[in-house]
Amino acid sequence: MESRRSKRARGDPVASGTRRRSGPRVTRAWLVAAVVSGVPSTLHALSTGGDVLRSTRAAASLLGGTGVIRGAVVHLGVSAFWTVVLAAVHRSRPLDARTGAVAGAVIAVVDLELVGRRFPAVRELHRAAQWADHVAFGALVGALLGSTVDELGATRPPPIG
C-alpha cells in the first residue's frame, strides 16, 4: 500500500489536498475571467464610439431591470455559474486555454443565441464583440483552472494522464 507522502510526491490530487483547495482556484478563475473577459467588447465600444457599459445594462434586462449595478450583479452571477460548470467539466476532462475557448464558444451559443435572443437589449449588442467576450471568458477560466501555479505562486505538478 502506497503512503500518503509518496502519493503527495507524485501529485495525487486526493493525497496532496488539491481537491480541498480547488475553491480558491475556482474563485480566482471566476474573478479574473469575469473582469478581463469584457475587454473585447470594451475595445469594440471604444473604437466605434459606443457605450462601454451597454452590455452591462443589457445584462440587467435578464432580471427585468436596468442599470449598471444590477447588470454587474447579473454578470457576476452568470459568470459564477459558468465558472462552476467549467470547473465541474475540468475535474473529469482537464481544461486549458484552448479547450476553455471552445467551451466559451458553446457558452456563447447558450447565452447569446438561445437565452439572449429573447431579450431585446441583449439581441441588440454587437454579436462579434459579445462572442469574443465569451471565448475570452472560457479561455481564461480554462487557463486558470489548468494552471500548474497555485494561489501562492508555487508550482504544482501537472495532472497525470
Image (cartoon, rainbow, N blue to C red):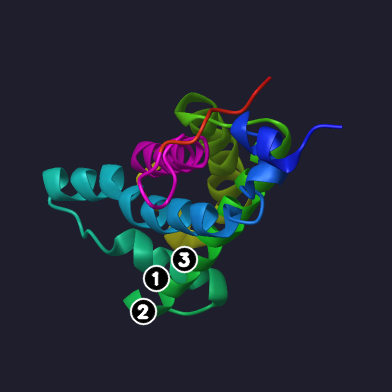
Question: Residue at horizontal 51%, vertical 59%?
Answer: 24
Q: What is the secondary structure assignment of the residue under circle 3? A: helix
| Residue 29 x, y percent position in the rendering | 46, 51
| Residue 21 x, y percent position in the rendering | 58, 55
- From the viewer's perspective, is 151 left or right of 47? right
Residue 89 at least partly seen: no
Question: Residue at horizontal 39%, vertical 70%?
Answer: 72
Q: Is residue 152 magenta?
A: yes
Quarter of the image for residue 52 reads: bottom left
* Location of residue 103 with respect to 60 vertically, above or below: above
What's the residue type where badge 3 is placed?
A: Leu
Question: Residue at horizontal 55%, vertical 75%?
Answer: 63
According to the picture, the residue beneath numbered tag 2 turns out to be 69
Lower position in the chain sequence, tag 3 or tag 2: 2
Residues at circles 2 and 1 in contact by the CB criterion of under 8 Å: yes
Which of the two residues, 6 or 61, is positioned nearer the viewer here?
6
Q: Quadrant of the N terminus?
A: top right
Report the magenta residues as a range: 128-154
According to the picture, the residue beneath numbered tag 1 turns out to be 72
| Residue 115 x, y percent position in the rendering | 62, 54
Residue 62 at least partly seen: yes
* Location of residue 20 with respect to 93 vertically, above or below: below
Q: For mark 2, does the 10 Å Cα neighbourhood hold few (<14), some (14 to 19), or many (20 or more) residues?
A: few
Q: Is residue 19 magenta?
A: no
Residues at circles 3 and 2 in contact by the CB criterion of under 8 Å: no
Magenta stretch prevailing secondary structure = helix
Residues at circles 3 and 1 in contact by the CB criterion of under 8 Å: yes
| Residue 88 x, y percent position in the rendering | 69, 46
Frontmost of labels 3 and 2 is 3
- From the viewer's perspective, is 108 left or right of 153? right
According to the picture, the residue beneath numbered tag 3 turns out to be 76
